[in-house]
Image: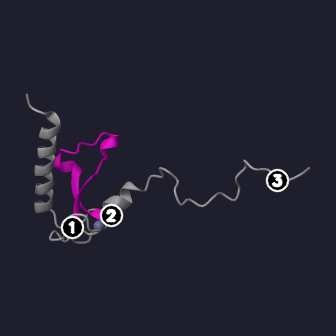
Amino acid sequence: MSNPRRANSSLRNKLRARVIREETHCWLCSLPVDKTLPHGQPGSPEIDEVIPVSKGGSPYERSNCRLAHRLCNQKRGNRQPQHGEKAPPSPLAPLKTSRRW
Ligand SMILES: [Zn+2]
């Protein structure tokens, strides 16, 4: 019996190699991507989904996958506020009332 997760992963690897081979520029910032950088650097090539998987996009479709810098990909991913970390406390927080009537 074949493991579907492993099959998908190899499909993904193939697509990733194809996108890196076919594209030269980051689709998010339009600057060239240095494909010689080792994985894990801010400028390393990564694959970004045009339509996020969480919104129904396919991570296995060539048309949905574009080349991006790792940093750009991360910035884009972090755009949605998630944990609110480092967010400054609102000066208009209505929860605490120290005013006496
Ligand atoms: Zn970029």
On the image, numbered disc 2 is attached to which residue? 72
Q: Are marks 3 and 1 in contact (CB under 8 Å)?
A: no
- Mark number displayed over residue 25: 1
Quarter residue 38 falls in: bottom left
Q: Is mark 1 within 8 Å of ligand 1?
A: no
The percent position of residue 18, horizontal first and vertical second, equals 11, 55
Instruction: Work out whether 94 lies above or below 68.
Output: above
In magenta segment, residue 50? yes
Which residue occupies 73% across, 49% down?
94
Q: Is 19 on the left or on the right of 73, as rendered?
A: left
On the image, numbered disc 3 is attached to which residue? 98
Q: Are marks 3 and 2 in contact (CB under 8 Å)?
A: no
Which residue occupies 32% across, 63% down?
72
Instruction: Work out whether 57 lies above or below 47.
Output: above
> Regarding ligand 1, which quadrant of the image does it lie in?
bottom left
Q: Compare marks 3 and 1 and give the one earlier in the sequence.
A: 1
Cα distance between the residues tagged 2 and 1: 12 Å
The percent position of residue 85, horizontal first and vertical second, equals 52, 56
Q: Is mark 2 within 8 Å of ligand 1?
A: yes
Q: Compare marks 2 and 1 and give the one earlier in the sequence.
A: 1
Magenta residues (range) = 44-70
Which residue occupies 31% across, 47% down?
52
